[in-house]
């Protein structure tokens, strides 16, 4: 297998060199699932058939518009699958696609349908078929903390409460939906809102338009089972679980129970199901949540503006901070693995709720590239938020973090209108995809290379990370990954100066790949490996 992947690596390099300025690199990846959990592609390369993937988060509204109404849609996503393969990702997280009155669609009114703004069920089925052919896995955003107020469950519960004589307790035998939500005769706290025409209140943690669901209710759990089965039968491999720490706000042990139920349920439908939950917390709380048995939790300890990756990039040339990148990976892995030996880490840089990496790095392109490498060289399932591969900017209010994808300079051909209230950045200095495709050292080309490296060497995603302190060079982060008999060393020069690493004692490792921010390459002279500023080297045994 290793020889095959090496061959594929050489082929890829040759293709990249040949196609330098007409880079429409679309590998033919019609995969065939083999025995022993491998997929073999028509180009001869193989990789594990599992949920360790490079996932791409798509906000359908802002991604690609196929019919000219200015709103992105599923046909638009289908039309960009070639692009996603050109980029190299092999998984898609679709933000909510169910009917909803808002642009963001986190207030669902029907879990079994497609929002008409995005298309039809036939469009969704066409998307699934295309993704199957390309071995692109799909997960859907499953918003279970709350529904929209317009969901029939909530409307029926409200109508029932209005029909009750004052002073009478609601009876779930008459209306089961009163137990789907948290209704109370008093305003328990500031997250409760009045039910119109009654003396009752309901909980809406995020907003009055999103009443919280009671995920311990058995009837509701049966509905969730049906919803999961419905979409998994259509081919999705699983779900991204929104706002899991607010299922029962401030009560992690109950949330862990709910996540355990959701994991068991998904795996009873498909043993290979993949779930990744949003628990926006530091690493020790994330570790606790792995007790649920869920495959993945987003690694907020490394992502967002307060995470480890940004902290390191803000302290380039600072040895102490730089070395903490490797030790933090080791520490997080140990803590997560202790609670779920089969966990799959889920690193990311940004998402639809955070600012974009361009802002975290003061738009310094070299740091943005290194951020991409730090994310994509981490173990687990790496997530990339659409537009990060172009270095798009976006911060401030939520819509501004969800701006239209920059396909071309003319902003036509699939470009969407900004969502309501979106404040577009004054400029995008790095340019659109159209421009970046033609530039050898664009951030887009850097992402392509980093993702290709990740795919060619599954030890990068599957390996257990440890800090390689014996390879100590000032401001070079050194991580070893071990996966069965395979291992690799990932060296990152997180400084503005050239660094030299002495590889004496590491003769079993050979240079398998490198990522550089400009024309200065990584060179090896004897046992000395020379890394220009911000360069990354991957050595495999
Ligand atoms: Ca449209």
Image: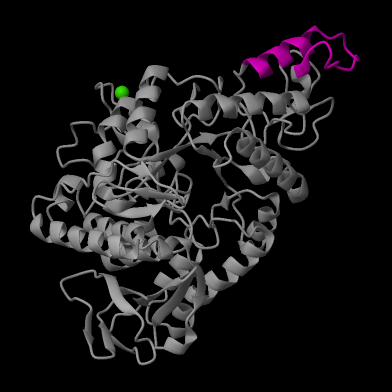
User: Would residue 157 be counted in the magenta stretch?
Assistant: yes
From the viewer's side, name the closer residue of 176 and 338: 338
Disc tally is 0
Can you see residue 417?
no
Of the pair 242 and 513, the residue shown nearer to us? 513
Question: Could you tell me which quadrant the N terminus lies in?
Answer: bottom left
Comparing 93 with 212, the one in front is 93
Q: Residue at x 67, y 19 (%)?
A: 154
Residue at horizontal 37%, vertical 34%?
132
Q: x, y (%) of residue 356?
A: 39, 53
State the extent of the magenta-drawn residues as a range: 152-176
Is residue 390 at all visible to an observer of this figure? yes
Q: Is residue 204 above or below residue 350?
A: above
Position of residue 277 relative to residue 59, above or below, is below
Residue that lies at the very extreme toward the front in this rendered image: 35
377 versus 505 height, above or below = above
Q: Is residue 170 left or right of residue 383?
A: right
| Left or right position of 363 against 239 | left
- Residue drawn where x is 24% and y is 70% of the image: 516
Q: In the image, residue 85 lies at what x, y percent? A: 27, 44
State the colouring used for the structure image: one colour
Q: Quadrant of ligand 1?
A: top left
Q: Is residue 313 above or below residue 139?
A: below
Q: Position of residue 184 (x, y in %)?
A: 82, 27
Residue 324: image x %, image y %? Answer: 50, 77
Q: Quadrant of the C terminus?
A: bottom left
Horizontal side of residue 16 vs 279, given as left or right:
left
Image quadrant where residue 62 sits: top left
* Image-based side of 401 in relation to 66, left or right: right
């Amino acid at each position: 297998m290793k020889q095959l992947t090496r061959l594929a690596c050489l082929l890829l390099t040759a293709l990249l060199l040949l196609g330098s300025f007409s880079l429409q690199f679309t590998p033919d990846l019609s995969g065939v699932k083999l025995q022993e959990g491998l997929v073999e592609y028509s180009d001869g390369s193989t990789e594990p058939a599992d949920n360790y993937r490079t996932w791409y988060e798509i906000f359908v509204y802002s991604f690609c518009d196929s019919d000219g109404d200015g709103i992105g849609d599923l046909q638009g996503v289908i039309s960009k699958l070639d692009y996603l393969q050109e980029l190299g990702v092999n998984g898609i997280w679709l933000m909510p696609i169910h009917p909803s009155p808002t642009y963001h669609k986190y207030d669902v009114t029907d879990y079994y349908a497609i929002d008409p703004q995005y298309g039809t069920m036939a469009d969704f089925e066409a998307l699934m078929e295309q993704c199957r052919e390309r071995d692109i896995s799909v997960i859907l955003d499953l918003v279970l903390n709350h529904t929209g107020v317009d969901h029939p469950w909530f409307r029926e519960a409200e109508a029932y409460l209005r029909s009750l004589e004052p002073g009478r307790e609601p009876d779930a035998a008459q209306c089961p939906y009163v137990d789907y939500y948290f209704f109370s005769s008093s305003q328990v706290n500031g997250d409760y809102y009045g039910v119109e025409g009654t003396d009752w209140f309901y909980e809406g943690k995020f907003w009055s338009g999103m009443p919280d669901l009671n995920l311990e209710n058995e009837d509701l759990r049966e509905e969730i089972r049906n919803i999961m089965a419905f979409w998994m039968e259509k081919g999705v491999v699983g779900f991204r679980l929104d706002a899991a720490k607010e299922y029962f706000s401030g009560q992690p042990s109950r949330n862990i129970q709910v996540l355990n139920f959701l994991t068991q349920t998904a795996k009873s439908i498909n043993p290979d199901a993949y779930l990744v939950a949003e628990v926006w917390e530091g690493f020790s709380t994330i570790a606790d949540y792995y007790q649920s048995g869920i495959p993945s939790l987003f690694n907020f300890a490394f992502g967002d503006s307060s995470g480890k990756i940004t902290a390191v990039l803000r302290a380039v040339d600072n040895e102490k901070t730089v070395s903490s990148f490797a030790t933090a990976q080791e520490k997080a892995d140990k803590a997560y693995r202790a609670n779920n030996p089969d966990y799959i880490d889920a690193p990311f840089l940004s998402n639809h709720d955070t600012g974009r990496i361009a802002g975290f790095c003061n738009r310094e392109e070299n740091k943005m590239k290194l951020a991409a490498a730090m994310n994509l060289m981490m173990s687990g399932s790496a997530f990339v938020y659409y537009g990060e591969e172009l270095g798009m900017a976006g911060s401030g209010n939520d819509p501004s973090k969800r701006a239209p994808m920059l396909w071309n300079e003319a902003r036509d051909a699939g470009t969407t209108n900004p969502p309501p209230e979106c404040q577009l950045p004054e400029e995008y200095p790095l340019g659109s995809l159209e421009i970046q495709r033609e530039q050898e050292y664009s951030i887009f080309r850097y992402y392509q290379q980093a993702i290709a490296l990740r795919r060619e060497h599954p030890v990068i995603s599957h390996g257990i990370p440890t800090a390689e302190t014996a390879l100590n060079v000032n401001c070079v982060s050194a991580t070893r990954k071990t996966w069965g008999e395979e291992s690799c060393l990932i060296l990152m020069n997180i400084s503005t100066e050239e660094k030299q690493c002495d590889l004496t004692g590491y003769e079993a490792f050979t240079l398998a790949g490198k990522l550089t921010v400009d024309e200065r390459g990584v060179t090896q002279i004897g046992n000395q490996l020379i890394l220009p500023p911000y360069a990354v080297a991957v050595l495999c045994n």
